[in-house]
Image: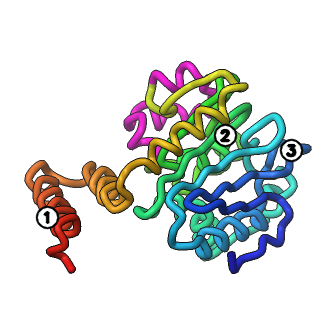
Amino acid sequence: MNATPTSGEARFDVDGPVATVTLDRPEVLNAQTPALWADLRTFGRSLPGDVRVVIVRGSGRAFSAGLDTSVAATMLGGVSEAQIAQYQEAFAWLRQPSLISIAAVHGHAIGAGFQLALACDFRVVAEDVKFCMAEVTLGLVPDLGGTKRLVELVGYARALELCVTGRRVPAAEASQIGLANVVVPAASLSDAVSDLTAAVLAGNRDAIVEIKALIAAAGGHTFAEQEAVERAAQIRRIQDLSGLGE
């Protein structure tokens, strides 16, 4: 790795094709700060090319209780669009086509914590989870990419309701409405994440990259447009597998 985290608010580990981000401020339920986001952004930019899966988890009793309240007071004093764009980059790299990102979520996932989980491709959720888009309670809006992913997962009406009410969504409901890929007992969370990681790694990397790109684009395409990009992707795969693309 050519990046060294400076905030001390997270641990970053790379083990072959798997990278792990562990939010590590358990004493404040892994509340987030711009310093953490800077480290996340740097880590994302510095990942080795052979990393295929990124796991995001939280230490202690919660995934993340959201924005650190002391930071929130400072930010309310003024923040620029350029600064917010940098904060967004801290989460955006988790969506890149070359990676599959998995959020291992337990306890609270509130505000920025909810949006960090949403930035990941998959959410493996413990039974004690409470999701909450709490920005409205501060007079703010979700601004870390969460609104688009939330609409994609649960639809317009449900996404709007969750954002404007700030209510808490338990694990069972999260599974029912599409926020969670799987719900497991808290003691089984690590094993469930490991099983999903192994299943992803068992697949052909180039095929998975193409599939993720196809799925990500599908919502904005007509059937004819999607069929066209499917054809192009399949030709690339066949050429690669047969050696004709060399």
Mark 2 and mark 1: Cα distance apart in space: 45 Å
At x 59% / y 71%, what residue is drawn?
Answer: 47
Q: Residue 210 carries which label?
A: none
Mark 2 and mark 3: Cα distance apart in space: 20 Å
Q: Mark 1 sits on what residue? A: 235
Mark 1 and mark 3: Cα distance apart in space: 48 Å
Q: Pointer 3: residues within 10 angstroms few (<14), some, or many (20+)?
A: some
At x 54% / y 37%, what residue is drawn?
Answer: 195
Residue 157 in magenta stretch: yes
Q: What residue type is labelled 2?
A: Ala
Residue 119 x/y as whole percent = 53, 52
Q: Quadrant of the N terminus?
A: bottom right
**Which comes sooner in the sequence, label 2 or label 1?**
2
Residue 242 x/y as whole percent = 17, 67
Q: Mark 3 sits on what residue? A: 26
Tell whether 121 sits left or right of 54.
left
Residue that sits furthest to the front in the current view: 242
Q: What residue type is labelled 1?
A: Ile
Residue 57 x/y as whole percent = 69, 46
Label 1: state its secondary structure. Answer: helix
Q: Mark 2 sits on what residue? A: 134
Q: Quadrant of residue 138?
A: top right
The stretch in magenta equals: 149-176
Residue 51 versus residue 127: which sits nearer the camera?
51
At x 21% / y 64%, what residue is drawn?
Answer: 241
Q: In which quarter of the image is the C terminus?
A: bottom left
Question: Which mark is in front, 2 or 1?
Answer: 1
